[in-house]
Amino acid sequence: MSAARERGTTTRRGIGSAVLIGVLVVAAWLTIGSGLVAMAMAGSDAQAAGVPVRMGEQAPAWSESIVPAVEGWSVNGESIEPAAPAGTWPGGEALPVRRQGGLAMWAYGDPLTAILGSAALWAGLAAAGAIALVLVPAIRATIAGRPFAPGNSRRLAVAVAVTAAGWSASAFLPLLAATRAIQAENYPLPAGWLEPDLQPSWWPLVIAGLFAALAAASRRGSRLAADTDGLV
């Protein structure tokens, strides 16, 4: 009776694992497909990507001011719309401001520039899907109770490389797009007014570091498991 019950539990566990792995594989391919679709859409709508730029050293001095839009107030003699009632935003009250991102300009008329400028989206999706596919065998082995199976450390190292490649594409391809956009005739600005600006997101490197730590732990665990088997 207990043996039959154990076999039934093992069978259900195996089916559950197979379903989980199947869902992960499908999700990974869908993510990669979404990245390819995003890249194709960027190329077909060539003004959909903002490229990162900054004011160059040769640009004239410039400044900006932030003024709350309140009814009855004016800037240079002109009212600001839409405006909030004065009771909602009384004069003299501090205006909270939080900046997100850097200066950007829209790239249009060049599909390649638009594709490069939107790399943060499609490269991130493609890299995420590829990482999931690379780690499927390691996840399967871990579910089966073999977290230090041969090859797991290598797969995790490949995941580190894919993460680094996706981050590099997301960071540096928009920089190349900005260079192309600045040099295009669509922006006839004096030379030196705008410069490409590197505006990377750093969190993917944290993911890469975690994968690297797991790869090192898996490699050490595999060696210990091999030594233990040798002793037995």
Image (cartoon, rainbow, N blue to C red):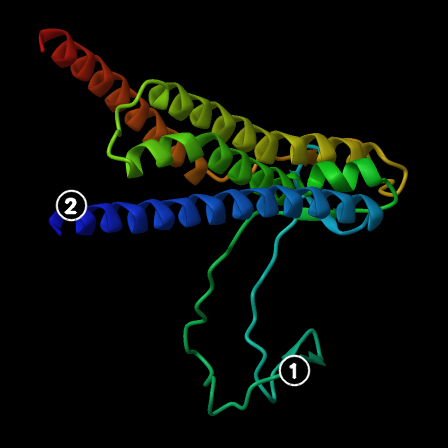
Please name the residue shown 46% across and 60% down the image: 98
Can residue 182 be seen? yes
Q: Quick check: 74 left or right of 158?
A: right
Q: Mark 1 points at which residue?
A: 82
> In the rendered view, would you say 66 is above or below 160?
below
Q: Name the residue under label 2.
A: 3
* Disc 2/disc 1 C-alpha distance (Å): 74 Å
List x then y, in percent, for residue 171: 58, 33
> In the rendered view, would you say 138 is above or below 60?
above
> In the rendered view, would you say 76 is above or below 51?
below
> In the rendered view, would you say 72 is above or below 144?
below
Quarter of the image holding residue 223?
top left
Q: Quick check: 137 left or right of 200?
A: left
Q: In which quarter of the image is the C terminus?
A: top left
Q: What amino acid does circle 1 point to?
A: Pro
Q: What amino acid does circle 2 point to?
A: Ala
Instruction: Determine the residue located farthest toward the front in the rendered image.
Output: 1
Query: How many numbered circles are shown?
Result: 2
Can residue 56 be seen? no
Q: Nearer the viewer, residue 214 or 167?
A: 214
Please name the residue shown 76% across and 52% down the image: 48
Quarter of the image holding residue 168?
top right
Q: Quick check: 129 left or right of 43?
A: left
Q: Which numbered circle lies on residue 44? A: none
List x then y, in percent, for residue 57: 66, 32
